[in-house]
Amino acid sequence: PANTFQVTPAGKVYFLSNQSGKIDVVKTDLDGGNRQVVLPGSGSEDLGNTILLASRDWKYLALLSKRDGGDNAKLFLIDTSNDQTTNIDEGNASFTPIGWYDDSFVYLVNRTSYSSWQPKATSTKSFDAANKRLLVLDNTNATGSSNADAQYENIFAYSFAKDQLVYAKTWYRYPGYTDVAGQQNTLNTIKADGSDKKTLKSVDAATQYFGSLQLTKPNNLEVQVSTNGGGPTTYFTYDGTSLSPDTTLTDNTFYNTNVITYLLSPSEKQTFWSEPRDGKNTLFVGDVNGAGAKQVVAQSDYQTFGWYTDNYLLLSKGGSELYILPVDGSGTPLKISNYYKPERLFNGYGGGYGGL
């Protein structure tokens, strides 16, 4: 059927494309016109691990890419006001994007050359794109002088909740045992600007550790506390303010719940998400808490991609086609372009766009 709407706001949408045979960063108008290559691929990109994540207002893009060659990918910032590229971070390390909060991009650094007994092997960092300022939010600790006596922290569970990064730090003894005497495993929060750093909960590292974090609603984070040796598992929920025991959660409900990714609108007043229905996707828009759901696309092959202002939704299809639709669901989705997406998903992540 013909489209029954016209895209009225001026603006550009950015995405990855390997139409040229290399992985380029490309932009087009919202109707797919005026296609331009913003950052040509070099041919050194990793096909499975080149990632582009847009901030909610589309002012900034974070690009993870090996475009400069070498053994390790680097992190780059693209400012969409002038399409200029800035180096965020590089080195003998692997970088794991966590996501955007406002103008700050948050990510994890694992320094591959560090020995097990060296502190700061893993860090959480944020890059303030507006002020070009790099912050270290937290570092892991370690003790010992060789593998024989090495004890070390790791960060493997993390999620955004409201305006905070929530992350767990877990102690190990070489080569990977989690029963570490004399240490505390911690669940922590910090804002992207480095403020309000808190420890929500500590557990004895000899007996317990934080197993997984699962965001089931925009402001409802489920926290799993596991016991070494296969003992009982306990659960808590965090609402962005307080951590509370949750006896309604069990291993069965925790592992078998369909985790929905709620994409937050630029104004932070609405959310956009998908639910599976009879093998197809039904798309909804609701309030900031994921309530008041209004169906905008019935059972289809479309999936969520992001927002463009609070008036338009961006959809994907088949992991290779990008569409736009008014927020009220009127009309037929208008195709913008084909695009390239590696097999990498940011499920449970709602701070930026293009990661699903």
Image (cartoon, rainbow, N blue to C red):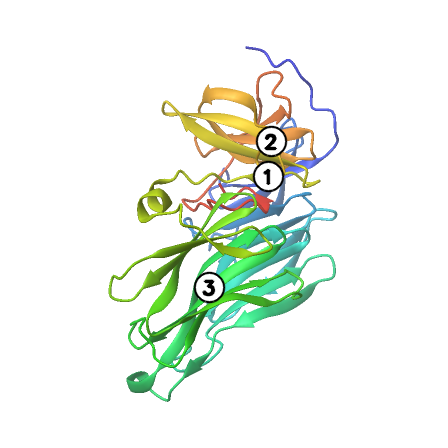
The kind of residue tagged 2 is: Gly
Which residue shows up at 57% across the image and 27% down it?
293
Mark 3 lies on a secondary structure that is: strand
The quarter holding residue 224 reads bottom left
In three-dimensional space, the C-alpha distance between marks 2 and 3, rounded to whole angstroms, equals: 30 Å
Q: 21 or 242: which is nearer to us?
A: 242
In three-dimensional space, the C-alpha distance between marks 1 and 3, rounded to whole angstroms, equals: 24 Å
Q: 39 or 306: which is nearer to us?
A: 306
Residue extending farthest to the top is 1
Locate residue 91 relative to residue 309 in the image: left or right: left
Query: Residue 81: percent from the left, percent from the top?
Result: 74, 47
The kind of residue tagged 3 is: Ala
Mark 2 lies on a secondary structure that is: strand
Disc 2 packing (10 Å; few <14; some 14–19; many ≥20): some
Is mark 1 in CB contact (under 8 Å) with mark 2? yes
Mark 2 highlights which residue? 286
The quarter holding residue 314 reads top right
Query: Residue 221: percent from the left, percent from the top?
Result: 50, 50
Q: 84 or 44: which is nearer to us?
A: 84
The kind of residue tagged 1 is: Asn
Locate residue 107 relative to residue 234 in the image: left or right: right
Which residue shows up at 53% across the image and 33% down it?
273
Q: Is residue 68 visible?
A: no
Which residue shows up at 47% across the image and 33% down it?
320
Q: Which mark is residue 168?
A: 3
Query: Residue 321: percent from the left, percent from the top?
Result: 50, 30
Q: Is residue 341 visible?
A: yes
Number of numbered discs visible in the structure rendering: 3
Locate residue 199 relative to residue 179 in the image: left or right: right
In three-dimensional space, the C-alpha distance between marks 1 and 2, rounded to whole angstroms, equals: 8 Å
Mark 1 highlights which residue? 289
